[in-house]
Amino acid sequence: MKYQVPQFIGVEDKIFGPLTAKQFLYVAGAAAFAFILWTVLPRILAIIIGLPIVALFLAFAFYQYNNQPFINVFESSVKYFMSSKIYIWKKIPKTPKEMEKADSEKSAASYIPKLSDSKLKDLSWSLDIKEKIE
């Protein structure tokens, strides 16, 4: 039995003339918002406030950035700026001369002799020394 495979599933249907349903809703929302501002506020203030918002709605409806709808780009940018960021510090390795200098300063400040290769013995020795000093 043969079945017909749907094609062009990524293309939205044009419902309202040359506009898709999403585009029509964005344009209608922009028009409604502009009308409300025009009737409520003084004319110059309505233009100053309404123009950027209407432009944003029209960008949502028609503009694409890197073949992505502008609403996706806008949403991602808002999430980026609102979320906390983790900065990771990458330690730069020291040169051999800097390491020798740091070792000499460290050894001059507090000298604890190494009695053995066992870390447990070194730890017990250092604890015994601190108890006797105090």
Image (spheres, rainbow, N blue to C red):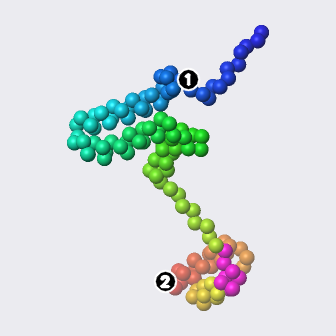
Q: Upstream in the sequence, badge 2 or badge 1?
A: 1
| Residue 86 in the image: above or below residue 26 | below
Residue furthest to the top in view is 1
In the image, farthest residue toward the bottom: 108
Q: Position of residue 102 (x, y in %)?
A: 62, 84
* Residue at disc 1, secondary structure: loop
Q: Which amino acid, by three-letter code, is at mark 2?
A: Glu
Give the secondary structure at mark 2.
loop
Mark 2 crowdedness (10 Å alpha carbons): few <14, some 14-19, many ≥20: few
Asked whether 95 falls inside the magenta stretch, the response is yes
Q: What secondary structure predominates along the stretch shown in magenta? A: helix
Relative side of 79 to 91, left or right? left
Question: Does residue 115 appear left or right of residue 106 in this picture?
Answer: right
Kind of residue at badge 1: Asp
Q: Where, by quadrant of the figure, is residue 98 drawn? A: bottom right
Number of callouts = 2
Q: How far across and how far down the image is residue 116, in percent? A: 72, 79
The magenta span reads 93-100
Image location of residue 53, percent across then percent down: 37, 42
Look at the image and tell me in which quarter the N terminus lies: top right
Q: Is residue 40 above or below residue 5?
A: below
Q: Which mark is residue 53?
A: none
Q: Residue at x 66, y 72 (%)?
A: 120
Residue that label 1 marks: 13
Task: Inspect this view and state whether residue 112 appears.
Answer: no
Q: Residue drawn 47% across and 35% down?
A: 61
Q: Residue, x 30% and y 33% (percent of image)?
A: 35
Residue underneath mark 2:
134
Of residue 77 and residue 88, the one placed in the foreground of this image is: 77
